[in-house]
Image (cartoon, rainbow, N blue to C red):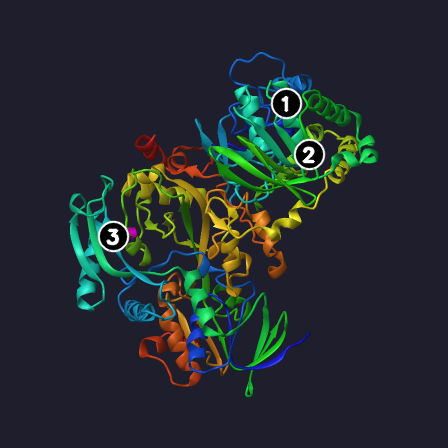
Amino acid sequence: MTDRRILVVGAGPAGLSAAATLAQAGQRVVVVDQAPQIGGTVYAQNRTGDTRPLSHAKERRALFDVVAAQRERIDIHCSTSFVGLDYQGNALITGADGFLFQPKAVIMATGARELVQPRPGWTLPGVTSVGALQVDLKTAGRPPEGRIAIAGSGSLLYALGAQLTRAGKAPAVIFDAAHPFLHPLATARLPLHILQEATGFILTLIRARVPILSGTRILSVEEKKGALSLKTNHGGRFRTVEVDRLGLHDGLARNDYGLQKNPTIPVIAAGDCRDVLGRFAAVKDGNRVAAEILNLLGTPAPGISLTSLNTEKAAQRRLKSIFAHDGCNDLNDLPDETILCRCENRSVADLKALTATDQTPRMLRLNGRFGMGACQGRFCLDWVAKLTAAEMGSGPSRPQRWPLRPVLIAEILNAADHSGNETHIEESAKCTFR
Amino acid sequence: MSRNLQYDAIIAGAGIIGASIAWHAARKGLKIAIIDASGPAAAASGASDGAVSVATKRPGVMASLARASLSYCADLAEQAQVLNGVFHTRPSYLFARIDAEAEALDRLTAMLTDQGLPVDVMRDGVAEKSSVPGLGESVARVLELSGEGHMLGYEATRAFLEESGAEGHWPCRLDAFEATKDGVILHTSTGEMRADRFVLATGMGTTNLLPDLPLMARSGQLIITDRAVGNDWPDLPGPLTSAAYLLDKTAQALPETLAPVVIDPLATGQLLIGSSREGGGTEEQTDFHMARRILISGVASLPALARRRVIRVFAGVRTATGDGFPIVGELPDMPNVFLATGFEGDGIGLAPLIGREVAGMLTGEGAMAEVNALSPMRFTRQKVASQ
């Protein structure tokens, strides 16, 4: 059997709308997502039987209905990982029913990458990203125990703050490195749907009397008597705050991980994975990329208007200026013991200890061991690049090769081979290791 | 800004071979510059296993060179020497599953005794009595060797470069060179450079400058795993290599289920699993089918491997030659231009020795007979003979 369906990686707004557009044009599509359900991060649903209404329920329903109408042509695999592409254009999918096949094209719709800037203590237990706290809240249906601080920069701080408050657990404090409330003109020019949502978040936080300290950065985190002690800096005034959980968030970036160049098949990014424009734009971008793929395959494609995409782009530019701050420049002042690469436990001191011979992207990886652990640089290479760019001209390069995430050898062997290039060994291997 | 500098020798290629030549030549008092289109260890030296092996070499010149380099590595690894802390000896384990593999082990033990190699057989027998626990049912026999070496290509490259005091220039692409009677002129992306002598240690890159050389890329899939968690991983103090790997080197056809495999424990606690021998390729050219063949063979030999996670896969690109021997020596029609390439995966192990011998050629002292046998003259003679 030779499987040549189109692969869509990620079942969020961009991936689902791309799949629906392709299916409407008569294409057969495989959608994979590592989560146990479709919807992506934004439409994640709690799994514990909580029946309270979901946020964004209307948009979620609309998206799911479009997909449901095309169920015959869309094959959705949840709790399934896309391992990557090899140079011949084979795609490996692992999970409960993993397989190896050769898609006609790949759409990467894996969402944005959340940035968390290194600070002393950022790897302590109890410190996570804001995005991770949000997914936990949505899927577990209840907020975590203890006092929660949210810190960093970006609109997600307020979204999580409001969602925690509505779930009955207002955060103890929000520290924003930027001054988002000092930009009334830019704020007033945001599109109505964003403004409405933002106002809702802020009102919820104000009603619950959540302290919002803008222009305040977290300098370090220490563990003290089972709690987290945060040292903050507000324009030169230093304070210490004690909490139990800390959510950090330093913005979102496009996700170029896994966007492997491939000589044999088209691979195109859609949604926040390509450009962080939010969920409204992601649906539109999914349509757009699907049309692009259809054109490449030489099949009739629907015309897609780009007006709404451009509106969202302008809105995101404004949001960026509202949340602009100079926190990243302080990377150079990080104390030596600050961990940069948490997988390999490499610190600022380790980076400084590297010699002249190590100042190439390649040697920074090989001898420096930065980005060589389980995450392959997903979380550290941006910061290592910023800290080394002065000497090197460019930061360490990210290899775009499989696997995109660590993958069990047993899972690689157990994947059924539908690539049209089967070998009989696969069957015998499966019997042994399944 | 154009440079117009005079060196005793310029070396193109900052891989382990070029770095070793630079270190040895600088020690002889030569003023050295080393240039590279991208930087140190940018090709095979940074994408390879670290085996400094005698046992996996073909008998004859290659085994003899490997033996000499292994004992030279040990000298350079002594206290306060350049490879101290970089080169180590460690045990290594070769196993056989079928008769053809067992016969390869017999040939190997005979060679180890006949040629007086510095590698000893610690144990040879059925898998159950081996000191490697957790071997798969298909493993019939294990040969345990002591005295083989390990040295990571990029660590040795760095050590040689830093201790050499040679001027490093990168990124600096070599566009052309002219051999004149007053020395060699290099035209590079950062300007013109001059030297009395010039060495090309540029691996596959050599074909851009000397397209007539019989060089070909032969890549191999390399798989890196995570660290073992818990106690379910058998203690493996050295690489576990299927004897099929020995058969592969002499190009014997093998059944698909017996793909050559080496499971090599890294100092980081991760494993390096290799490797195939494919025609052509770049580092990006990873192949699921080939990787699965290697992993199937690996899991059959060591079932606990199935529970490890793969974190990285890449293809190491070896530079092979038409006759299977490296090319080392002065080019016949270009005085003062020397070549050192075509090591096809033996470069890590041979680099210390080759560096020493090429440095001898640069000063006019000459080299040992086995290295002289690798001269590029052999291709010129072939051409003459066939005309």
Dot 3 alpha-carbon crowd within 10 angstroms: few under 14, some 14 to 19, many 20 or more: many
- Which mark, residue A163? 1
Q: Nearer the viewer, mark 3 or mark 2?
A: 2
- Which mark, residue B94? 3
| Chain containing mark 1 | A
Say yes or no: labels 3 and 1 on the same chain: no
What is the x, y in percent for residue B190? 63, 71
Inspect the magenta stretch and tell me whether residue B72 lies in it.
no
Q: Is residue A44 above or below residue A344?
A: above
Dot 2 alpha-carbon crowd within 10 angstroms: few under 14, some 14 to 19, many 20 or more: some
- Which mark, residue A432? none
Q: Secondary structure at mark 2?
A: strand
Describe residue B97's horizontal placement relative to residue A129 as left or right.
Answer: left
Q: Residue at x 38, y 63 (%)?
A: B348
Describe residue B200's horizontal placement relative to residue A256 as left or right.
Answer: left
Badge 3 amino acid: Leu
Badge 2 amino acid: Leu
